[in-house]
Amino acid sequence: MTKLYAPQVERYAHRLGRFNYMGADRNTVYDAETYRLLDMLFQKLDLIEQRPDSDGIWDLWLQADRGPIEAFGNFQEMLEDEEVSSYEEYVKLWRESYPAEHDWYSFTAVRRPDNEYRGVFLCHRQVISQFSTIPEGYPLDIHEFVQWLVDAVDECIDKLRSGTYNREVAENLPPQHRTGYVLQKDFWSLFPDSRDELLGGFTQEELNTFSALVQAQEQGEIKEKRLAQMTSGDFFRFCAMGYAANNYSDQQLSPREQYLKHADGRDEGLTKLPEDDPAAFLEWFNSSRGGGHPWEICRGGNSTHIDLFPRQDEKGFFLVLAGDSWGRTAETIKIFLALSKSGIPVILREAKALGERVAGIEKMGIVPEGVFPRYCHSYFPDEHIIDFINLPLEHREELSKLCVWQPIPEVRLVD
């Protein structure tokens, strides 16, 4: 039996996860012993019920012992690489990295019909990828790791037979591996700086006004007011209102120049239009375009930018403002307030969620360690949650007691 300890398991997971992430999975060739053990692994998985409503997916929780300090790393090598400066620091780093006697690992195995594909995911990252057509190449020898997987699955099967597996997981799975939510106000009780960062730039009057606007929008009290026509100059002026509300730099520039400075840059010709010609804007607005981001007025990442979309209906033009990432919340609210105060017809996306965020009653989704906390809506099929975090290390125990955790799906043997 191959005995791998937690640090060794994680080194394999990191190396193989990075290998597959780099897109090399379809070209992976394993050695004969690894293939033999993969066959054994999936034979053992056939004894376990698959994920409900799936065809060839298994989920388990595997464990590995922390093991001796030598499994963590070679002291002399770490000393030479300046990772540590003394043996005492070496021991301290080991215990900080592996405080528990056992570590837990999410395990998911996938097998497609006719064995055209078999994959293994550990810590929410693909670590093994096997296709029915094996390309030529230098074989990757990971039989030691796959043997550990076989033994760990075997251990789960023994516990399932004895009736202890599900109880042990439910009682002992660390909170950083669980899924749930915590109310914003409860998070703030342990991390008050987070509240100050979000709300510190607002007066109470502004917060009250925002709350009233959100309530009016949620109740369908969207004003009938529309802009009869619109020009590119109008749009740049609306953007400049938002920039000014957030004290962006270079406000002495023209609205168009401010847009050029702060927006995404892929404007699809918007900045080349005559700024006072509604017919030119309307023709451009209704033309076929693609690939650009003309409405990304505050550039950022895929989920961390702010958009201001002009929309047109039979009554005229109005604006839709979108910017619900936690780090852009304050900016978005200030833009919304500035446009609303000026009488510009504007609708705020995720208004209810942002209103709850400001009030401290938003549900913050907590996703397992190893899951990047973006686009995690599928983890909460029965909840409307738009903000996600991993359970922080600081105040972890206190915060976990304030969380509402989802039940952990039970696993059973095939009847």
Image (spheres, helix red, strand yellow):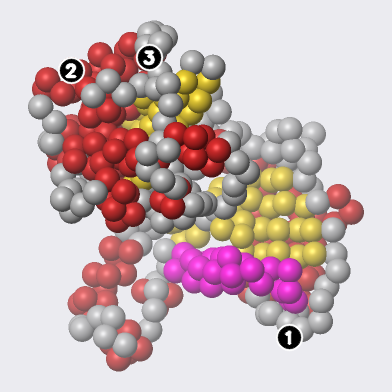
Label at residue 225: 3
Residue behind mark 1: 138
Quadrant of the image occupied by residue 391: top left
Instruction: Characterize the local packing of mark 2: few (<14), some (14-19) or many (20 or more) Cα atoms within 10 angstroms.
Output: few
- Decide if residue 37 is in sight here: no
The magenta stretch spans which residues? 5-30
Q: Which residue: 49% across, 40% down? A: 280
Give the mark, 2 or 3, whose residue is nearer the N terminus: 2
Q: CA distance from mark 2 to mark 1?
A: 65 Å
Residue behind mark 2: 208
The amino acid type, in three-letter code, at marker 3 is: Lys
Dot 1 lies on which element? loop
Asked if the magenta segment contains residue 156, the reply would be: no
Give the mark, 2 or 1, whose residue is nearer the N terminus: 1
Dot 3 lies on which element? loop
Q: Magenta-highlighted stretch: main secondary structure?
A: helix
Quadrant of the image occupied by residue 242: top left
Q: CA distance from mark 2 to mark 3?
A: 23 Å
